[in-house]
Amino acid sequence: MRQLLHTPEGVRDIYNRECRQKLAVQEKLRNMLHSYGYQDIQTPTFEFFDVFRKEVGTISAKELYRFFDRDGNTLALRPDITPSIARATATLFEESDLPARLCYTGNTFINHSSYQGRLKENTQMGAELIGDDSIEADAEMLAMVVDGLKSIGLEEFQVNVGHVDFIESLMVETGLEEDTKAELRILINNRNFFGVDEILDATNVDPRIKDAFHNLQELVGCVEVLEQAAKIAPNENAKLAVAHLQKMHELLTLYGVEDHISFDLSMSGNYGYYTGIIFRAYTYGTGDAIVRGGRYDQLMEKFGKQTPSIGFAIIVDELMSALSRQKIQVSTDKVSIIVFGENTRQWAISLAKDFRSKGKNIELIRREAGKDKADYVEHGKRSNAVSLMYLEEDFVIAMINLKTGEEKLVDCK
């Protein structure tokens, strides 16, 4: 029985003020996405296992929550919403050649190892631009990320941008086995460049390519690092990737978001389906990215439709942690409390109806024997109400501001 009173590891209850704040953040972000012309889509919380199979490029199977339906089909809770959007779009927009702008909110589920100390259920909000391979689409995505984070009051954050073709061009030039390349990617993602040097020094890789890998750690910062990247680009694909980022930066200045953009040529995507630009947003108060995104021009092919796409996901729970630690308050709907007794019930209901018709949020509480005004004031403060109206028997209201403690009497006779 005791176990039933607790949540499983990696999930938690959210209530009261924290829940209101989270919903308010989601509303502001949704309004921003709508302002760019994105339309809402909802996909199932679980899908057939094959939607998230290894070939699609999501997480490893051992980190999926899998189960069976009564017909024996293997299903999985979604660890990532993008493949679900791709699957749905391939069906819903099968005949359309025009770009589709879609946005979503939903929970994802990843069975992390317990020692990682991370939530296994996260809320994500995101946007996907389907059917547009232009540089303007890339810039629009990054502008939306910046505008979205600013819309909730975040000021100190950075969006790191890279390009898959740059780092993959270096990998190709090494001529190493895939297992060794995978090991290099892990070391680079962990910024363990000593480990990278150690592996490469034990091979006969071209010294020019070894130097390029060694210099990766320096290719992080403002737009000037792109000039350095162009000098060590090992082939035409890498040069085109750098040129793409340079042109995109010009567009980002038109949006006025360039101050929040930095470049990191060592970036490679966590998911295997990324094909072009990739980006992550970071801020103070959380050790993980609050936004992840990139271009995935080949993902739709897995579901039978060839079309370029780009998108991002905001990890809302990481974002809420950062807002809390930075003491950034997001405005929420205000709630007032009316406390009534047996003889003031009709009056209380009438007042509540009137206030609600004017868009106010009212909580009605019947006074209990043995409790006085101070008990309800304390309750109001705990529930983050803004004010309390305490109805007296002689049609006098004690109006109490729960933020300042100021109280005044209003005679309504």
Image (cartoon, rainbow, N blue to C red):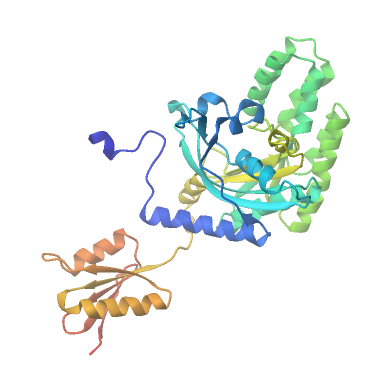
Residue 391 picture location, percent across and down: 22, 77
Q: Which quadrant of the rendered structure holds the C terminus?
A: bottom left
User: Is residue 410 placed above or below 139 in the rendered structure?
Assistant: below
Which residue corresponds to the image point at 80% horizontal and 42% vertical from the top-left? Answer: 245
Question: In terms of depth relative to the viewer, which is nearer, 86 or 104?
Answer: 86
Q: Total number of numbered labels?
A: 0
Q: Is residue 328 left or right of residue 182?
A: left
Question: In terms of depth relative to the viewer, which is nearer, 219 or 11?
Answer: 11
Residue 70 picture location, percent across and down: 44, 31
Q: Is residue 152 left or right of residue 263?
A: left
Residue 324 visible to an observer of this rendering? yes
**Quick one: which residue is furthest to the front in this view?**
71
Q: Please identify the quarter of the rendering in which residue 84 is found.
A: top right
Which residue corresponds to the image point at 38% horizontal and 75% vertical from the top-left? Answer: 356
Which residue corresponds to the image point at 78% horizontal and 57% vertical from the top-left? Answer: 254
Q: Please identify the quarter of the rendering in which residue 203 is found.
A: top right
**Quick one: which residue is furthest to the right in this view?**
236
Q: Which quadrant of the rendered structure holds the N terminus?
A: top left
Residue 363 picture location, percent across and down: 31, 68
Question: In terms of depth relative to the viewer, which is nearer, 408 or 355?
Answer: 355
Residue 242 picture location, percent across and down: 82, 38
**Quick one: which residue is furthest to the left in this view?**
370
Residue 259 visible to an observer of this rendering? no
